[in-house]
Image: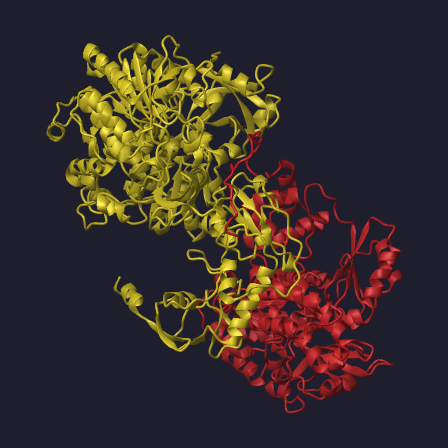
Amino acid sequence: MSGERVIEIHAAAPARRRTRAQAKGRQPADDAIAHVRELLGDAPRRRDLLIEHLHRLNDAQGCLRDDMLVALAHEMRLSMAEVYEVASFYHHFDIVKDGAAEPAAVTVRVCNSLSCAMAGSEELKASIVRALSARSDVRVIDAPCIGRCDSAPAAVVGTHCLGHAQVHDVVAAVDDRHVKATEPQGIGFEAYVAQGGYRLLDELRGGQRAIDSVIAALSDAGLRGLGGAGFPAGRKWSIVRAQPAPRLIAVNIDEGEPGTFKDRVYLERDPHRFIEGALVAAHCIDASAIYLYLRDEYAGCRAMLERELALLRAARPELPAIHLRRGAGAYICGEESALTESLEGKRGWPRLRPPYVAEVGLFGRPTLEHNMETLHWVREIVERGTAWFKQHGRNGRSGLRSFSLSGRVKKPGVHLAPAGISVRELIDEYGGGMLDGHTLYGYFPGGASGGMLPASLADVPLDFDTLQAHGCFIGSAAVVVFSQHDSARQLALNAMEFFEHESCGQCTPCREGTQRAVELMKQPTWNRPLLEELSAVMMDASICGLGQAAPNPLLCAMKYFPQEFSHE
Amino acid sequence: MSSAADLATRVTTVEIDGRALEARPGETILALAQRHGIAIPHLCHKDGLRPAGNCRACVVEIGGERALAASCCRSAQPGQKINTTTDRVKRSQRMVLELLATDAPAQAHTRQSELSQWCEALGVTSSRFDVHEPPPADTSHPAIAVQLDACIQCMRCVRACREEQVNDVIAIAGSGADTRISFDFDDPMGQSTCVGCGECVQACPTGALTPANGAALVEADREVDSVCPYCGVGCQLTYRVKDEKIIEVVGRDGPANQGRLCVKGRYGFDYVHHPHRITTPLIRREGVPKTLDGFDPGKPFAIFREATWDEALKLAGRGLREVRDSMGPNALAGFGSAKGSNEEAYLFQKLVRTGFGTNNVDHCTRLCHASSVTALLEGIGSGAVSNPVADVADADVIVIVGANPTVNHPVAATFIKNAVKDGRTLIVVDPRRTEISRHAQQVLQFMPGSDVALFNAMLHTIIDEGLHDERFITERTTHFEEIRDNVAQCSPEKMSAICGIPADEIRLAARTYAKAKNAIILWGMGVSQHVHGTDNARCLIALALITGHIGRPGNGLHPLRGQNNVQGASDAGLIPMMFPDYQRVTNGDAKSRFEAAWDATLDAKPGLTVVEIMHAANEGRIQGMYIMGENPAMSDPDLAHARAGLANLKHLVVQDLFLTETAAFADVFLPASGFPEKTGTFTNTDRRVQLGRQALSPPGDARHDLWIIQRMAQELGLPWQEREVSAVYEEMRSVMPSITGVAWSRLEANEPMIYPVADERDMGERVMFSEHFPLPGDKARLVPAQVSPANELPDRQYPMVLMTGRQLEHWHTGSMTRRAAVLDAIEPEAVVSVHAADLRDIGAQPGDTIRLHTRRGSIHATARIDASLQPGQLFMAFCYTEAAANLLTNPALDPFAKIPELKFCAARIAPAGELATGFASSHANQHATP
C-alpha cells in the first residue's frame, strides 16, 4: 500500500431505513413446517439424521426448497447455517432458492470417469442432450464414477442404472418414466440361513467359539482392509476392543474410487455375508451398534438392504442395532473420518488425526471402521480356515484379491484372483484378453488415485506393498486397463478433474491444488516443473488421502509416458 | 489439585531445528516454536479458537512421519525431531501461501493482512497461477463489509460465529472449489440472522470481513483500553482513536468476555460524536412551557439559551437551595445513574445526603432488580450475585428464568451456550420462547405473571419427592417449615392450571434441577418487574437453598444486572434506604460512622424511591430535583404521570449528554461527559470492579461528571475540593469494606478481582456463602411466597398482556444507542412484537403500523410478528421516544421493593387506521389517552 494513500473513515451505516416486519433473517412459514413434519413423520429429529431428513425432502420434491430448509432447521432446532452447509456440501442435493426454477422432473446422469470416458461417455452425453434438447422435463448432467465400470458407458435415469448405455435406451427410460432402481435379487435372509448363514455368529454368541480364535484367524489369514489402506483387520479389531466402551462399528459401503465396483457386486449377490461379518465383529469387540454407510448411487442395493435388515431384525431382535445410512454423492465420504462426520449428519470433512477413528470415532466413541468387503470375508475365512485363504497367491504373495477389472478388456467385472497376480496375467486369465484391436498401453492398478503404470510394467505383482516403488498403490484393486487408442495424459486429466470435483474443500493444498492442476493440465503444454512442485506439496501437506494421492496419475503420466510430452 | 500441578510442571523435550526445547503439557508444536522465537507461518490458527489445521501454512516435518504435519494442531511428543526449515517444509509453506495469495485483492481491505505479512516473510512476491474472477462485495450489513475476494476459507469466522459466540450464522458452504463462507443460506449478510457481534471481523486474518466504515485500513493515533458502557456483563475493550474520534472498538481479553463483544459494544460507540450532543451549559428560556409537545432534541435553543458554567452552576445550585431552605430537605431528590462510574455514584449520593440533607436518592435499579436485591438481602444477606456468569461452565444444570441473555447480556449468553454445547443441561423458564431456548433441553413457556405458582410447584415436587438437601437445610437455613407448609397445597397438577405448564413438565424441571450435582439459576427482569417480584425472587432463592445449590462453584444465584454499573451504583449507596455497602440508613451505628466520615448530619429516615418521587413531584411534595444521566421521562412506568411530575417541579437540573426527554423539562442543563471521555471504575454483574479509561476529551465545553458534581456540591454550600477520580475512589474505598483490598493501583494493573476483597493481596471471593450467610446465626432465611395475580389482568376491554423490555441493539431509553449509526440502522423505528394470529385477528399485516392501547395511553408502532410469543402476548422495547412503551405500563408497585410491574399490563391492539402512518403523527399522538 502506498504511503500517501488517505483513507477516509465514513459513516458505517446507510441512511435510515424501514424496519423489518419479522425477526432477522429467514423465518419458517407455518405451511412449510407442516409439510416438513408430514414428510419426517415420527422420525427422530436428532442431528445425526440431518442427511436422512434432507433426503426425505429431496426425494419428495425433487429438490431442497429454501422454505423447506428453513422449516427443517426450525423443526430440528438447528440453525439455518447448520442445515445449509450440509445440504450444499453433497452433490445429490439440489437446493432451490428464492423462487428459482426447480430442476427438471427427471435427471439423467452420465458417468464421465475413467472407464466410461474410454467407452465414449462424452459422445454419449452429447447425443443424449441432442435427443432430449426439446424437452424441459429432463436434464442431463455429468456424474463421477457410479460403480458401473464393468458396463461402461453407464448412465442413470433417476435412480435407474443403464449399463452399456445407448441413447435410445436412455430416451426410452425417460419416456416410460422408468426412473427407479431395480432391486438386485441376491441371496435373501432365509436362503442365507439355509446355507449355514449366521451359524458362526450364533456359535460366538452361544459361547461355542472363542472371540480370540476369530481374531487370530483373521490375523493368520493376513486379511487386510480392502477399502484401500490395507490395515491388518485382526489388529484393528484388537485395538478397538481395547478401547473403553461403548464402542461402535461403521461399515464403509461408499465405494466411489473410479474403477471400483466390487462392493456393489458382492452386495448384490450376497448381502448377509458382510452383515454377518459385521455382527461377528460387533460381538468380538463388544460394539453396541453398527452403522452402514451406503453410497447414494446404489439405490437398488439400498432398497434390498432395507428389506433384508428388516427381516433380520424381525427374526433376531436380540442382535445389536444396525443403522443403514445413505450417502448423498460425495466421494470423500469413503475416507474413514469423513464418513464418520457424514454419519453424524455433517459435512464430509476428514478429521485431523490423531486421534484416530479407532480411539475417537463416531459420536466420539472408539469405532471399528471397515470396508464392506473386508467383513464379507470374515465368515469364509473362519469357516474354511486360514490355510484355504492363504493357499492362494502368486509371485510370492498370498491370499485372494477381488479385482474390479474394467477398460479395454473383453471380460470386465469383479474377478477373485490370487494376490500378487500381474496385470498381464489378470487380463489374460480372467479378463478374456484385451479387446480386439487394442493392445495394452498402460493401466491404473488401484483406481484413479493409485496412479498409472505402463505396459512395460505389466508383470509387476499386484498387491499391497508391491507398487510403492513405482509411485503407485493397489488401493481398492480397481484395475483400469487402457490401450494404444487412449492417452495417458488425457486419462490423468480425467482423474484430476475427478479429484477437483470431489475435493471436500477443507485444506488449501487439495482445494486449490486440484483446481490449479486441472488448469495447468488443460494447457496445450504442461508446466511440468510447476506441476511437479504443486504435486509434491499436495502429497506432503494435504490433510487426507484424497489430496495426497490426487497427483499420482499426473506424476505417472509424466514419468511413464514421456512420449506423450515429447513435442513439448 | 496436586496432580494438576504435577501435570502443569511436567515437561516434554522435543527437538526443533536441532534445538532441544521443553514443551508444556499439551502444547502444540506451533505454540512451542512461537514461544522460542521460531516463526512458523499460520493463518487458520488463532489463539482461543479450536485448531482447524486446514490452511496448511504451518506444516512442519516430524521425523518418522510420511507426510508433513500441521504444527497448530499437533501436540509435541517426547523425543520428536521436528524441522521447520527444510526445503521440503519451505516448499509447502510457500506454495500454500502462493495458492492463497493468487486470488487476493490487489488493493488490500485491511492494513494488517496476515496473509500479506507471511507472504512477505517467506518471500512469496508473485503467483504463477491465473487469477480467478473475484466474488462481488456484500455491503448489505450496516456494520460489516464482506469482501470474499480476500477470503482464504480459513474458517476463523466460522469458528468465531459458531463455536465462540454460538450465533450460528456463518457456514462453510459448498465443497471443493466452490467452498465458500455463507450467511444462513448464502444470504446477504444484512438480510441474514446475523446479530452483528463482529466476532467474525475480529477473527478474520485477511480483511474479507472488515468494519464497514473502513477502519481496518486506518492506523489509529492511539489505542485506549477500557470497558464497555452498555450492559452489566463488563466486557473489556480497546478504543482505536483517530483524529479525536473513535473509529473502531476491539474486544480485549477480559475475565468476563475473553475478547468477545456484542453489536452494542463493538459498533455502538459513535453516539458521543452525534450532532445532538450538547456542548455548552443551557438555561431554560423564560416562559417556555414544560412539555414534550414539539420537542426536538436536535433543537436545544427552542427551549434553552446558552450559558457559561459559572452562570449555569450558580442558577442550578440556587434553585435547589431555595427549595431546600423554604420547603425542607425532603422536598429535594436526586436521581443518579447506573451508567455512571462508582465514583460518580458515590459522590452523587453523598451530595444528596449531605448537601440536600435527604435520603431521597435513587436510580434505575429501582426499575430493574430492586425486588431481587430485597429478596436476596432478606434471604441470604447480600444483594449481589453469589457466583459469576462464568460459573455456568462448572454447573451441570443451568436454569435461566425471565431473562433474555442473547439480547440483553449477549456476551454472557455466549458462555452459557458454550457450556450447553459442552454438555450442560439448560432449562429456560420464560413466557417467551427466547432465542436461547433453541439450545435448551427443556423450555417452560409459562403464563405471564404466574411465576410463583410455577416455582411453588417445583418446590412442592422437590420436597414431596424427597429431593431436598436435609443436611444443608438444617445446617445452613431457617424457616424451612414455613416453605414446606406453604407449598404443601401447591401440587404441580394444581399449579398447572395457573401457570399453563403440564404437571409432568414441572416435575421434570424440578427433578433435573434438584438432582443435579451442580446447578445455577440466572434470572432477569422477567422475575423482578412484577408486583410480586420480591416473591418471585424469594422462590428462586428457596429453590437454591432447599437443594443446597449455593455456596459452591457452579451452584448459585445470579440476577443478571442490566446496566454496566447498576451493581456498583447500588454498592456505592445510590439507593434511598442504604448508605454505601448496603448499610441501612436506619442503622444508628452505620449512620454515626458515615456522619463521622462525611462530617455531616445525616437523615435516619429512608428516602423515597424512583416511582414514589414521581408521585411526590406530582403532588408538590418534591419540588426540586437533580438528575444525572437518568431519563425517567422514558424509563418510568405510566409516563404521562411521570412527565407531569417532572413538569410540576419548581426546579430541575439535568446533567446528560443529550437533551433527553427528561431534559426537556429542565431549568438548567449541564453538558456532561460520555463514557469514553472519562476515567472511572465500574462494577459488573459478577461483582468485578474494572477501570474504564478516558479515550477522548469531552467535546466543546462539556465537562467530566465528577467535576460537575463537585462544583454542584460547592454551590450547595459543601466544602468540597475538586479532586481526581482516583482520590474520590480511595475515599469511597475507605468507607466500603467490600472493596478494601481493591486499590486504585490494582485496577490500573487490570487485576481480575471480584469483591469482597479483603486486602491488597486478595483476589476476592468468586463464590460467596461457602461457609456462612451474613445473617443472624450465619443462616439463610427461607421466605414463603403466596400465589398472587398481576395487578392488572386482561379483561374484555384490554384482552392482551403487554410485556416491556429491551432489544439487542437498543439499550435502556435509547438515548445512546439510537444515536449510534449502526444500531439505529439495524433497528431504526418503533416495533411491537405480536403473535401472527393476533395480528391476523385485527386484519393487519406484518409491517403495518398498529395502535396499542392500555388504560394509561396509546401509541403507534410497526407490527413485527414474533414466533417466540404466545397468542395474546405483546412485547415492546421502551427505547422509542416516538412510541414510548412506558406511556402504557402500569405503575403498580411491589410492596417490598417498590418496583413497578413493567412486565405485565392489560392491553389491546387495533389497526392504525387513518390516524397515523409515519413518524411525525405517531410522535404527535404519543400523549393521547383513550
Residue B56 to residue A406: above or below? above
Whole-percent x and y of residue B28?
41, 66
Quick check: A186 left or right of B169?
right
Confirm whether residue A312 shows in the render.
no
Q: Residue at x 21, y 11 (%)?
A: B327
Whole-percent x and y of residue B479?
22, 35
- Give the quadrant of residue A445: bottom right
Residue placed farthest to the front in the image?
A4
Quick check: B807 left or right of B374?
right
User: Which of B43 and A160 lies nearest the eye of the viewer?
Assistant: B43
Q: Chain A rendered in what hue?
A: red
Whole-percent x and y of residue A502?
66, 63
Residue A504 to residue B172: above or below? below
Q: Residue at x 60, y 28 (%)?
A: B846
User: Which of B731 and B37 lies nearest the eye of the viewer?
Assistant: B37
Whole-percent x and y of residue B350?
20, 27
Q: Residue at x 40, y 78 (%)?
A: B18
Which quarter of the rendering shows the N terminus of chain B?
bottom left
- Give the quadrant of residue A515: bottom right
Residue placed farthest to the top in the image?
B287
Q: Chain B rendered in what hue?
A: yellow
Confirm whether residue B928 shows in the render.
yes
